[in-house]
Image (cartoon, coloured by chain):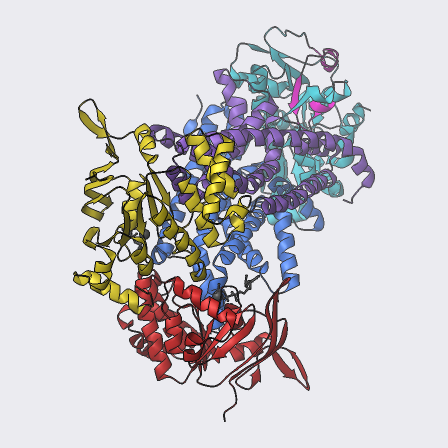
Chain colours: A red, B yellow, C purple, D blue, E cyan
Amino acid sequence: MPSPIIRIDNIVKRFGPLTVLDGLSMDVMPGEKLALIGPSGSGKTTILRILMTLESISGGHIEVDGEQLYHMKKGADLVPADEHHLHRMRKKIGMVFQHFNLFPHKCVLDNITLAPMLTQGVARSDAEKRAMELLDMVGMADKAKSVPAQLSGGQKQRVAIARALALSPKIMLFDEVTSALDPELVEEVLSVMKRLAAETDMTMLLVTHEMGFAHDFADRVLFFDRGKIVEEGRPEEIFSNPRQERTQTFLRKIIAAGHRV
Amino acid sequence: MPSPIIRIDNIVKRFGPLTVLDGLSMDVMPGEKLALIGPSGSGKTTILRILMTLESISGGHIEVDGEQLYHMKKGADLVPADEHHLHRMRKKIGMVFQHFNLFPHKCVLDNITLAPMLTQGVARSDAEKRAMELLDMVGMADKAKSVPAQLSGGQKQRVAIARALALSPKIMLFDEVTSALDPELVEEVLSVMKRLAAETDMTMLLVTHEMGFAHDFADRVLFFDRGKIVEEGRPEEIFSNPRQERTQTFLRKIIAAGHRV
Amino acid sequence: MEWDWDFVWQIMPTLLEGFKITILATILGAAVAAVIGLALAIARRSPIAAVSRTVGFVSEFIRGTPLLVQLYFIFYVLPDIGIRLSPLVAGVIGIGVHYATYTAEVYRAGIENVPRGQWEAARAANLTTRQAWIHVILPQALPPMIPALANYFIAMFKETPLLSAITVLELMNQAKSIANSNYRYIEPMTLVGVFFLAVSLVSVVGLCWLEERYARMDD
Amino acid sequence: MIDWSGYLSLILEGALVTLQLTIMGSALALVMAFLAGLGRLSRFFVVRALATTYIEFFRGTSIFVQLFWVYFVLPFAGLTLTPLQAGVLALGLNVGAYGAEVVRGAVKAIGREQGEACIALNLSRYQRLRHVILPQALPLMLPTFCNNAIELLKGTAVVSLISLTDLTFQAQVVRAQTGNTLVPFTTILILYFVMAWAISTAMRWLERRMTRSLDGVRT
Amino acid sequence: ADLEELKEQGFARIAIANEPPYTAVGADGKVSGAAPDVARVIFERLGVKEVVASISEYGAMIPGLQAGRHDAITAGLFMKPERCNAVAYSEPILCDAEAFAVKKGNPLKLTSYKDIADNTNAKIGAPGGGTEEKLALQAGVPRDRVIVVPDGQSGLKMLQDGRIDVYSLPVLSIHDLLDKAKDPNLEVVAPVVGAPVYCDGAAFRKQDVALRDAFDVELKKLKDSGEFAKLIEPYGFSAKAAMSTTRDKQCAAAQ
Ligand SMILES: Nc1ncnc2c1ncn2[C@@H]1O[C@H](COP(=O)(O)OP(=O)(O)OP(=O)(O)O)[C@@H](O)[C@H]1O
Ligand SMILES: Nc1ncnc2c1ncn2[C@@H]1O[C@H](COP(=O)(O)OP(=O)(O)OP(=O)(O)O)[C@@H](O)[C@H]1O
Ligand SMILES: [Mg+2]
Ligand SMILES: [Mg+2]
């Protein structure tokens, strides 16, 4: 049996007096597709941001692909990671944000080629070839020369996905990638992601409020509440037969609000 | 048979070169609950804003409660309405906005009492008594002294509804009152509105992307596209058996995106 | 030329005398700038194009030309058309009007920063334009403006030395007069620098406090 | 009979000096603004402290005091500058300190989100700044830089007080030689305004060019 | 700077005032006037081909000289004991008595600095750091009635506008100002009663005594040859007055 690609061990995260993650532990296997659900403020975004090294951690350890993420070996000791170590670890991980965060001053193509050229030393022609393949995959090849301002939200998000893929990370993180989109535009992004999930063996972690999508996408669903994993299991189990009271109320409210499960 | 409380006759609205409403006509009967649905940019918000006199019109006529809205009689002629006429007409209409637009420098109670005291000369004690009744109705009586910044989105929206009701308008306009809310908070607002719809004989116009809610709430649903009404009918008809191709695609997409109908 | 402490103590009372005038000129100038600035901001929003354009142009002109030259004008040219102001009054008006063109921009930004939704909510609540201004817009627009206004008043304080050109005996002028009659520039000029730095450091702290206190309220 | 054309050409010579001061001062200010503005955002405490000290000192004391210091006190430390150098140095350092805050503000305004996208793409600190943050921050800085340049232009009038033969100074000379106040002062007011107008026109043009591709960006 | 350095660089930097007839700036920008003319001739004879004049406030001249901004001051900066301590003066060049400009008919009847001190309503204008300011203060005029005026035109204007009652400058300066103003409502009181006749000299840095001495030698030759008179008398100055006194007398005068 392969060993986990992500090992999260007793992580604590505090913002000032507020403890957001409270001794969280979880493992992710290579190639697994994980959906993180749960009420607002439960720490779903925070755990993704910690994996992307956008936050620091207040306690605990994380191992990614066999190496410590926030620590490194110095002789026999484990010391806090320096910028160089983080830089190396970030190669393994990509992230897509709720608000796309495209670079508004660069065209779609340049948004995608920038990082490979700068961080991996890929030649422009190669980077552009690969970018066009990715754009083709997300159905955006014809917009390669547009700037983000000329795109709809759904199109922006598809470009953002292509941009993250261009670095070929082993792990992809998606944080509510559809919640800033008009309802009509949600589908185009979800269909891209479903294809992606089916076709690659990348490890994927997804935070979403779209229960239907979580259901179709994930191998395993984690239900978060107040910085803890309250329940986890296969989507069929969680959605049709939640064991915990908290999970049940949450799903009931979501359904009442008109979301399909 | 009673005569319509709103008569919209061949309305044209342009923003510069863009024609947003293109010869729109519709009637609303007193006490009717109307849901306006349709794709983004189709002019739903615009028609509500025109009724609230937040926009001017480029052509056509509107009659509200037997009087011209944007015109007034001067001798025998119809001339454009002046501020005084608009002020009088606005008494009949209230509106709740997508982003609540509460007054951030005033507490919940003052938000509600401000307009009755200033525009109807209601005494403070009476205004406050009525405000507390309304807050009670929307389940917010315990927050009367909070300022908006201390409230969640759903709570803000419930206060905004109470504020609009405080002026006892004959017609209430709701523009996507839940779309700025977290999914978990949507329900509390919708339940308030369902009660409201059931209990009063106010005329209500509602723009929404929540098809399920539109279904439960409305007597009649209007489907907008490109500044025209493409289809209208009872919710059962529209949602289960749309006749127009455009309506069908729209509903299909919405369903695919995970919204219940 | 070395630093002479005795000389420092000897000139201190004279400098303090000048410092008082500097402070007085700043406070009066700030008052003028605050009031005229609001008037300019409102005039610029006037629906009458002739008014808003003229006010716009005059503001641009005042803002694009040096205060020093304007002061000369007020002090030496205006008497030709029968307006004779005392040096301090001329200085306060000059510096006040000059800075009013800046505060007018602050007022304008503050007013425009109130979200459009607030105007619309006021409309929907059927308030009159006047009621909307008084009860909804200004109470929200004013507090966030305070730090920016204070900033300009500090800038104004630093420009008071210009008043020496029109014979106001403020701090800089006193220092120059001391320097001239003793042929020593180091001590008086350094002390003036220290005075200015001290006041600005204090005001930076004050400004931080104001900024915190009047941080934007949000919906 | 007064030889007006001769005296007006004297004033124009002054305009040339003013222009020189403005251009060279702006260049120095620009360099200082970026050095100190980015310095304040540095990871290293020493760099931050240095930048902060520079900014607070030059914003804290008046341009006047700085000018007198550079002109009269620096020579005792063995550094004698020509009046032009002294003027450029004082104006450039002064306006640069204000510009530094603009740079810092604009870089911060580009916001965490863009920075985080860069981290997720594994760009280095320098790459983030060079390829993502600055290209977006620059257009944000331009309007304020334009104001700063105009402030600097107006500040040049102050250098007449250290005997630099700029526009204002030449006007004073012409006034003394001809006994006429109105003509030279009106002339220079117009000249200053024309220069200010030219600056803002040029900046607007630049801004339009730089933001063309960013039109309608939603944030 | 010593003479050799000046010769080498080919010019001397002199400070002048913006005050006709001590200095004049032509419409072509050329600096003339009694003081720079004399300096120019003498420096030329010393082998320094040119003088570069920069116009300066009175108050800024001595600090400027000390700070090494000028090699000499030739500006009608009158010799006074404190100044003699601060700088090294040449022998006298331009002498002049003090004068008042007042409103026609001298309504306050002011003829001396003492009169101004005694009349509590009288305000006097004078250049900052100049002789007249000193004289007024010494005569007991309180600080707030001695208005520091930035330049001659401003002083005249303030007198016309009634902001001051007297404007005090050397006789020739006042005459020059009034000639230009052509204002029939003003008149001159000259010389001021009890005010000494002052003479200026070229002022050098204390450590540049050698340069000063060289300057003196040429100045003496100029005076003896009669060229001196030809240089300064067209501007209204009296060569005889300058030649009948010495630096030592002037520097001691007020003590
Ligand atoms: N930078 C921060 N400073 C302080 N508190 C923060 C910060 N970021 C997040 N938090 C807090 O941490 C808690 C968890 O936030 P997080 O964004 O992870 O929740 P979430 O599960 O993603 O919620 P949502 O569904 O609303 O996105 C919240 O209470 C939030 O207010
Ligand atoms: N102030 C305005 N200036 C210019 N165009 C406007 C303005 N307000 C609205 N529009 C345009 O009018 C059209 C209709 O807008 P409207 O807001 O009524 O659509 P909507 O049906 O409410 O859409 P949504 O579901 O996205 O809210 C859109 O194309 C919009 O861009
Ligand atoms: Mg989140
Ligand atoms: Mg809308």
Left or right of D134 on screen, residue A144: left
Membership of E113 in magenta stretch = yes
Q: Position of residue A92 (x, y in %)?
A: 48, 80
**Residue occupying image coordinates x 43% and y 27%:** D4
Residue situated in front as seen by the camera: D93 or C28: C28
Residue located at (52% from left, 49% from top): B149
Q: Position of residue A96 (x, y in %)?
A: 43, 71
At x 66% / y 35%, what residue is drawn?
A: E60
The percent coordinates of residue B110 (x first, y second) are 50, 39
Q: Which residue is painted at 56% across and 67% down in the image?
A: A226
A48, above or below D165, in the image: below
Q: Please name whichever residue, D163 or C173, is drawn nearer the observer in this view of the structure.
A: C173
Image quadrant holding the C terminus of chain A, namely bottom left
Rendered position, C183 above or below D129: above
Residue A98 sits inside the magenta stretch: no
**How many callouts does the rendering have?**
0
Pick the residue in front: A108 or A68. Answer: A68
x and y, in percent, of residue E253 in the image: 79, 23
Residue closest to the eye, A21 or E160 = A21
Q: Relative to A237, is D155 on the left or the right? A: right
Which range is magenta?
Answer: E110-135
Q: Is residue C204 visible?
A: yes
Q: Is residue A146 visible?
A: no
Q: Is residue A115 left or right of residue A81?
A: left
Q: Could you say which quadrant of the image residue A219 lies in?
A: bottom left
